[in-house]
Image (spheres, rainbow, N blue to C red):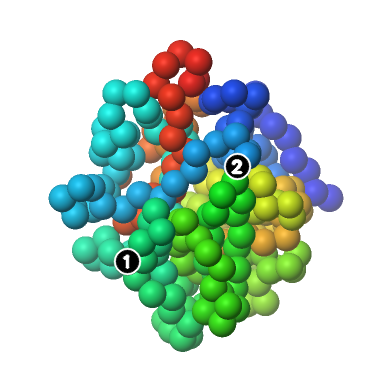
């Protein structure tokens, strides 16, 4: 039987609980999930500063926003090379840095189908990469990663119930209306099947995308969560007012 129990009250950042994070136990495993209302939230992708250097950390992104803004909730958002450049498609503020990759390959990124998270005005989509390449929608921000976790309500066909490959994992899911994005990180090592089921069976999202494992980190000051570690590549995060009314 599916069991989900919130073990920490959701705390909000911004107006009308536009961002709410909580820790949830699902089938005996703890996950932290942050719900982002895209109609009320400024959500962006971040990779490089004005000099072209990769940010690499939540702290550097937060500093770059200046005194009037701050980072609300953030996590690493897509696989990257040793120089922290994105492996697949990356678009920031309408400018494409890396093209979409549609070929099957080694590692989790190449475990097709993989997908693209596309952010436009107050909406998000997760689109299978080959479908995206065939008919790319306009995206102000986009990041490609893989594998997809949930595809039209079904788990990725390669996931094995009881698989022994376990890691701290993070990813994103989009509600059917495209206006709610869920950023999720497992708080203990889990396999792909367990992670994907959290999105499908607990969050009920029709599409979800894997971001990464081992390097997975979350920035959520509202619940006292500010993970640190080695530098990362693309970062997804909300931008909120630095004033008290901003959270």
Label 2 packing within 10 angstroms: few (<14), some (14-19), many (20+): many
Label 1 packing within 10 angstroms: few (<14), some (14-19), many (20+): few
| Circle number at residue 239 | none
In the image: residue 192, left or right of residue 86: right
Q: Which residue appears farthest toward the left when viewing the image?
A: 51
Q: Is residue 226 visible?
A: yes
In the image: residue 127, left or right of residue 200: left
Instruction: Please give the residue where the numbered disc 2 appears in the rendered image.
Output: 38
Q: In which quarter of the image is residue 125?
A: bottom right
In the image: residue 193, left or right of residue 3: left
| Circle number at residue 97 | 1
Q: Which residue is drawn at 67% across and 47% down?
A: 179
Identify the element where label 2 is drawn.
Answer: loop
- For marks 2 and 1 on the same chain, the one whose residue lies earlier in the sequence: 2
Identify the element where label 1 is drawn.
Answer: strand
Give the camera-side residue of 11 and 45. Answer: 45
On the image, the x and y values in percent for residue 143 come to 45, 62
Determine the CA span between mark 2 and mark 1.
24 Å
Q: Which residue is drawn at 70% across and 45% down?
A: 26
Q: Is residue 189 visible?
A: no
On the image, the x and y values in percent for residue 69 come to 37, 28
Q: Residue at x 46, y 60 (%)?
A: 142
On the image, the x and y values in percent for residue 18 come to 61, 31
Q: Residue at x 73, y 52 (%)?
A: 177
Q: Do the residues labelled 2 and 1 touch (CB within 8 Å)?
A: no
Give the camera-side residue of 204 and 65. Answer: 65
On the image, the x and y values in percent for residue 163 come to 60, 68
């Amino acid at each position: 039987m599916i069991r989900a129990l919130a073990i920490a009250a959701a705390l909000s950042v911004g107006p009308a609980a536009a961002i709410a994070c909580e820790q949830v136990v699902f089938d005996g495993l703890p996950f932290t999930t942050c719900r982002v209302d895209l109609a009320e939230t400024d959500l962006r992708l971040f990779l490089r500063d004005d000099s072209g250097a990769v940010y690499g950390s939540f702290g550097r992104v937060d500093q770059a926003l200046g005194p009037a803004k701050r980072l609300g909730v953030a996590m690493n958002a897509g696989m990257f090379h040793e120089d922290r450049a994105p492996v697949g498609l990356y678009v920031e503020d309408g400018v494409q840095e890396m093209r979409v990759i549609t070929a099957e390959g080694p590692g989790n990124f190449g475990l097709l189908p993989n997908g693209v998270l596309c952010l436009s005005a107050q909406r998000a989509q997760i689109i299978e990469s080959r479908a995206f390449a065939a008919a790319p929608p306009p995206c102000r921000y986009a990041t490609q990663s893989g594998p997809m976790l949930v595809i039209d309500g079904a788990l990725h066909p390669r996931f094995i119930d009881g698989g022994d490959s376990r890691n701290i994992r993070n990813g994103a899911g989009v509600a059917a209306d495209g206006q709610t994005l869920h950023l999720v990180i497992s708080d203990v090592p889990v396999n792909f099947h367990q992670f994907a089921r959290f999105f499908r069976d607990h969050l009920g999202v029709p599409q979800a995308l894997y971001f990464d494992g081992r390097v997975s980190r979350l920035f959520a000051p509202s619940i006292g969560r500010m993970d640190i570690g080695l530098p990362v590549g693309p970062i997804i995060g909300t931008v909120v007012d630095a004033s008290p009314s901003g959270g």
